[in-house]
Amino acid sequence: MKKENLTKQYKAIYKKSPTNIIRAPGRINLIGEHTDYNDGFVLPIAIDKYTNMLVSKNDDRKIRLYDLKYKENDEFHLDNIKPSQQNKWSNYQRGIAKVLLDAGYKIGGLDILIFSEVPEGAGLSSSASIEIATLLSFKKIYDLNIKPLEMIKLARKAENDFVGVECGIMDQFASLLSKEGHALFIDCRSLKYQYVPLSIQGYSFLVCNSMVKRELSESSYNTRRKECKYALRAFHKILPRIGTLRDISIDDFMRYGALLSKKSRKRIEHIVYENERVQKAVELLRKGNVEIFGKLMYQSHKSLKELYEVSTEELDLLVEIGRNEPGVLGARLTGAGFGGCVIYLVKDSSIEHLKEKILDVYSKKRELVPQFYEVVPSRGAYVEFIAGSGL
């Protein structure tokens, strides 16, 4: 939707002009799944689908919200922030406001219009894009002196503690700090990051939404986190120097893995080798070696399916369709799993044929019509001033 149309809708709802539009992207993860909350390595990109928030200040200490996707409004007072059971979509704004106040930041009321291009429940981090857009709105309107890494930590805290999803830090990181034409290599322990140029001329990333929607706070996601904590405690008894699963080397796993329960062994094996795959992927992409990178994508999916057990029959089918199509170098589920999307690295000239094949085979076997997104590695969140707002 064009900015001019959004501005008109804002004026119709709030009887005034917005001062700014804040845009925060969704993301896909190229490789490195479920490693972030184990202090490991990840390699996401921001995508050219954004959560758009038109904002202006109010003097009532109220946060007024209107979401164009839900066609619903909501509001809450900054002096009494509680989760909403009726309008759960507003809990992201509620959570962000609470963590800012708890951290001592001076904020006031906002009138917000929300239009998100990021599909929900697809593993593209719609929630992180909303959190970062909300944080950036408060930062801009109330001139908060808040550094990017602190913004990322606060956004994660809001989702962990207020919304109830024990996510890692990757999604918020990618939404805020991504760079156009690059992947973002993140060390989730040190929070150091590097930009990795994507020299994939002649190839593109195609995302296919399986249309199996997931609700992370009600899914097995939090269960996997608990299983990792249990596996860590078990391995720590064997090697006390281990602080997180990230500290377990391949040699450590080969030597001691057989001493663990079957479930713990499988979870640790995925994390250990997935971290290794991410680091190899960075080297390969820097050299422009897309063929071997594609093989790493297939390896990652196999591990997520067989060891971490977060795939579905639908996701597996989509990956297998890609494996059998010429021009497809790699495919894997992206995001937490339990539904959502598959990402393909595919030759530009093969994209339309791949789509046709998926529509034919997948729709017949699963009776679902998938959606496709040809995504471009894009910039992180930013603020635009709206001309004519009176400032």
Image (cartoon, rainbow, N blue to C red):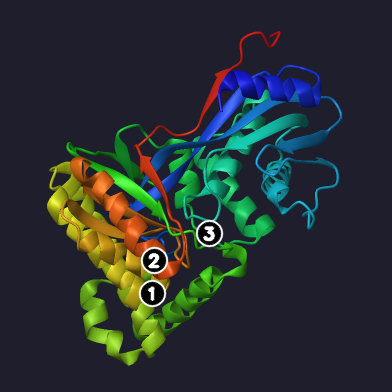
User: Which numbered disc flags the more N-terminal residue, 2 or 1?
Assistant: 1
Compared with 314, 136 (above or below) is above
Rendered residue at 14%/42% (across/down): 288
Q: In which quarter of the view is residue 259 placed? A: bottom left
Residue 247 appears in the figure: no
Q: Which residue is mark 2?
A: 364
Rendered residue at 60%/29% (across/down): 145
Question: Where residue 347 sits in the image (x, y, percent)?
Answer: 19, 45
> Along the horizontal axis of the image, is 287 left or right of 26?
left
Residue 263 appears in the figure: yes
Q: In which quarter of the view is residue 317 placed? A: bottom left
Where disc 3 sits, the SS reads loop
Query: Label 1 amino acid?
Result: Tyr
Disc number placed over residue 387 in the picture, else none: none
Query: Label 2 amino acid?
Result: Lys
Q: How busy is the neighbourhood of tag 2: few (under 14 within 10 Å), some, or many (20 plus)? A: few
Q: Which residue is mark 1?
A: 308
Q: How busy is the neighbourhood of tag 3: few (under 14 within 10 Å), some, or many (20 plus)? A: many
Rendered residue at 55%/63% (across/down): 214
> Along the horizontal axis of the image, is 208 left or right of 64?
left
Question: Where residue 146 sits in the image (x, y, percent)?
Answer: 58, 33
> Along the horizontal axis of the image, is 25 left or right of 18?
left
Tag 2–tag 1 contact (CB < 8 Å): no
Q: In which quarter of the view is residue 322 placed? A: bottom left
Rendered residue at 18%/60% (across/down): 295
Where disc 1 sits, the SS reads loop
Where disc 2 sits, the SS reads helix
Q: Which residue is mark 3?
A: 167
Q: How busy is the neighbourhood of tag 1: few (under 14 within 10 Å), some, or many (20 plus)? A: many
Query: Label 3 amino acid?
Result: Cys
